[in-house]
């Protein structure tokens, strides 16, 4: 049997956005695939602390913070936080524009509490946008921004009332950092992520494949949003969830049923993993 190296995004793929309880079918599929000799890794925008509760479902390692922190078992393969200068400049420029932030260290996230009011004012927005804002500022259990202890940051998530709000930070730091506005955003309700240009999910996939001795042709990636595009382009076989963005669907090899329709198990069977 030709062993495969599988990468699963979390929010909107292995679990519902902000969730920690995957469908039983997904857990069953991961367990069976590993029993058959395949390697299965988490591949998420979540930090390590937010991924740790999912380890109990049985994984060989993970990609956290969109590739900023990469591990296989107990071994750290890559670790690249923002510099202190980048952190300070980014937080100052975004906060000055009234952008609501969730800043993520390795183990904890710290969020502007004002985002909850912003969320409540936008109940008429599309369901996926609201679910992602709810997940980051409430569901994933961030600490208040006032408790931020100065730890190194790997990623920043933002929401605001218009794309012009992020322009000053993007002009100052755009050469060093990616400012990604998700395609489920709306003109007056923006949701996005800021990631170091030194890495992405695709580069992290390559690091793990090399470390474990897998050819990239034997890698499979599952995702649902624009943040997964580098992973989707890097792997040998790409899968987009049925609940995923049209942008990703058009660039993936396979579109499977949604997360809550047993999509992971369905795709694992289609790909001969179980």
Image (cartoon, grey):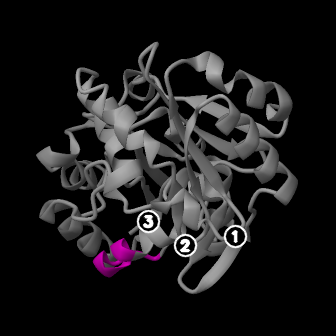
Q: Secondary structure at mark 1?
A: loop
Q: Earlier in the sequence, mark 1 or mark 3?
A: 3
At 31% from the left and 81% from the top, the residue drawn is 56
Residue 67 drawn at (x, y percent): 63, 56
Magenta stretch, residue numbers: 53-60
Q: CA distance from mark 1 to mark 3?
A: 42 Å
Query: Is residue 64 in sight in this rendering?
Result: no
Residue 142 is drawn in which quadrant? bottom left
Residue that mark 2 sits on:
107
Residue 242 drawn at (x, y percent): 25, 34
Residue that mark 3 sits on:
2
Q: Earlier in the sequence, mark 3 or mark 2?
A: 3
At 69% from the left and 73% from the top, the residue drawn is 77
- Look at the image and tell me in which quarter the N terminus lies: bottom left
Front one among 40 and 134: 134
Residue 167 is drawn in which quadrant? top right
Q: Residues within 10 Å of mark 2 (few under 14, many from 20)?
A: some
Residue 7 is drawn in which quadrant? bottom left
Image height of 133 relative to 106, above or below: above
Is residue 99 shown left or right of residue 91? left
């Amino acid at each position: 049997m030709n062993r495969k190296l599988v990468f699963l995004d979390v929010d909107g793929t292995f679990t519902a956005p902000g969730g920690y309880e995957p469908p039983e079918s997904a857990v069953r599929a991961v367990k069976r695939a590993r029993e058959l000799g395949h390697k299965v890794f988490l591949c998420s925008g979540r930090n390590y602390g937010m991924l740790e509760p999912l380890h109990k479902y049985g994984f060989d390692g993970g990609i956290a913070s969109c590739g900023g922190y990469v591990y296989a078992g107990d071994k750290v393969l890559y670790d690249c936080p923002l510099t202190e200068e980048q952190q300070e400049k980014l937080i100052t420029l975004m906060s000055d524009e009234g952008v609501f932030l969730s800043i993520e260290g390795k183990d904890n996230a710290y969020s502007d509490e004002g985002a909850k009011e912003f969320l409540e004012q936008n109940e008429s927005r599309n369901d996926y946008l609201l679910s992602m804002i709810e997940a980051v500022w409430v569901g994933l259990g961030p600490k208040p921004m006032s408790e931020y202890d100065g730890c190194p940051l790997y990623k920043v998530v933002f929401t605001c009332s218009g794309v012009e709000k992020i322009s000053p930070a993007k002009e100052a730091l755009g050469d060093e950092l990616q400012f990604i506005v998700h395609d489920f955003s709306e003109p007056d309700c923006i949701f996005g992520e800021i990631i170091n240009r030194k890495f992405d999910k695709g580069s992290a996939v390559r690091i793990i494949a090399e470390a474990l001795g897998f050819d990239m042709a034997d890698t499979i990636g599952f995702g649902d949003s624009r943040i997964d595009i580098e992973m989707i382009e890097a792997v040998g076989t790409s899968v987009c969830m049925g609940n995923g963005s049209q942008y990703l669907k058009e660039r993936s090899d396979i579109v499977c049923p949604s997360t809550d329709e047993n999509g992971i198990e369905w795709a694992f069977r289609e790909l001969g993993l179980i």
